[in-house]
Amino acid sequence: MSYSPLPVPSHLIQLIDALRARLRDPRFVARHRQRPADFTRQRTLTFPVVFLLLLQKTTKSVQRHLHEFLAQWLPEALAPTATPGAWTQARAKFKPSAFVELNEEVLLPLAYAPAQAAQRRTWHGHRLLGVDGSVLRLPATPALAKAFGQKQVTNQDGPTGTTYAEARMSVLYDLLNDLGLDARLEPASMGEVALARQHTGQLQSGDLLLWDRGFTGFGLMASVLARGAHCVGRCSRASFAPALELFRRDRAGRSVVTTLHAPAEQRAELQRLGLPLQLTVRFVSVRLSTGELEVLVTSLLEEDAYPTVEFGELYHQRWGQETYYGRLKGRLDLEHWTGETETAVRQDFQAAVLLANLESLLRQPAQAHLDTRGAARQHPAQVNRADSYHALKERVLELLAGERPAAAVLGQLQRWLIANPVSVRPQRQVPRRAPSPARSYQFQRHVRKAVY
């Protein structure tokens, strides 16, 4: 089946041109190399080559990846080669901050530019953000154990004597527009709430931040509200007294506005940070499809503007954060680390976040085309995310370092993305089964499919 060329939005052409220009900018290279002497000699593994190889992270062997990449990068050479040892030395000169800068200073500003306001999705005019943490298993090396700490392996008989390094990732994530805004990788000993409070510096006035019940506490709410943003958090049965009362009544559709006072043990720290010592918040109760009662706390106080009946569906949007982490750890195989140093791990992590954001923006025209073409379908069509990641990784060299006009490359990419969509069944529910080590092993060994 053939498709007529899709019009490529001008902001995506502008994005690719800006990324290309930044990669060629000597000042960008200087900011993100370890030493002034790095990447100054004419080598095969230049700064742009290292950047693109990291962005194109693969599960292939290092040597095979180098052969395939360099054959595409230097097609005129008879046998362009580089050894795994040379690659290890070259990537050690490269700072992970290069990916952070491109995300924060090029990609996100274009994604949130006023000209794109009509395409951005919001909830009642609020940018809907999520925050959560997830642990990552790292290679068992002394360097990573020192940088991130160790996890003791235990079984039914207690400690086995085996340890491995473990890190915690946390991403401030735009739930409706599928964009990672601020990504942090820290030792697993650092708590999720502490990382969430670090993210609050990236909030804008009017943002609405969602979190799970492990995050709900006075300090995090105070940090969010002090930025002019709002929050919705799930309450546990061991949280605030108004929430416990709603749990006791066990009735959905209830809304209570009250004032919370800072716990005595937090007052000194809150005062030092200039945060409020009392907050006016609203507790609402919703009934899940399972029959369980859920109580949420929010700074959205007005019933007329934010009806209680909408909060169940609103909080369900938080699930998008889980699927986002699923793509990072599953499709992009984040825990298949390409190096065994702290720098290598941070390179892989920040590269995955940038690649995921790039894919989110570049598939939008194809998804809009599928939405229009499939309006009469029984099940809506959606871009196959596995294919979109494959397509992006295979074209990343031509896209970010090629000579063809960005519009031509993007148009070809869009035709690929609309060719094999998948059907969306919104009401489909797959019952959860109890965890099983045998089933998990079977999935990891034979079923799980990583991209590229």
Image: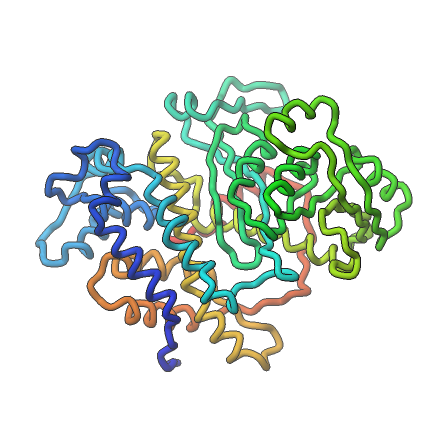
| Residue 450: x %, y % from top left | 43, 50
Q: Residue furthest right?
A: 249
- When asked about the image quadrant of residue 380, the answer is bottom right
> Which color mode does the image show?
rainbow
Residue at point 38%, 76% (across, down): 7
Toward the viewer: 11 or 76?
11
Name the residue located 85 percent from the left edge and 42 percent from the top edge.
247
Residue 394 appears anywhere in the view = yes
260 is higher (above) or lower (below) than 301: above
Residue at point 56%, 40% (across, down): 200
Image check: 172 left or right of 156? left
Answer with left or right where residue 211 lies relative to residue 247.
left
Question: Could you tell whether 33 is left or right of 282 in the image?
Answer: left
Relative depth, front residue between 264 and 424: 264
Q: Residue 306 location, x and y as percent?
A: 74, 58
Q: Nearer the viewer, residue 327 or 283?
A: 283
Residue 122: image x %, image y %?
59, 61
Question: With 433 as the anchor, is 78 left or right in this view?
Answer: left
Which part of the image, by quadrant, shows the N terminus? Answer: bottom left
Place residue 348 in its image quadrant.
top left
Please determine whether, in this image, residue 29 is positioned above or below residue 189: below
Relative vertical location of residue 91 with respect to residue 116 in this rendering, above or below: above
Residue 417 lies, in percent from the top left, at: 41, 68
Residue 446 visible in the picture:
no
Q: So how many labels did they put on this image?
A: 0
**Residue at the image position 61 percent from the left and 57 percent from the top:** 126
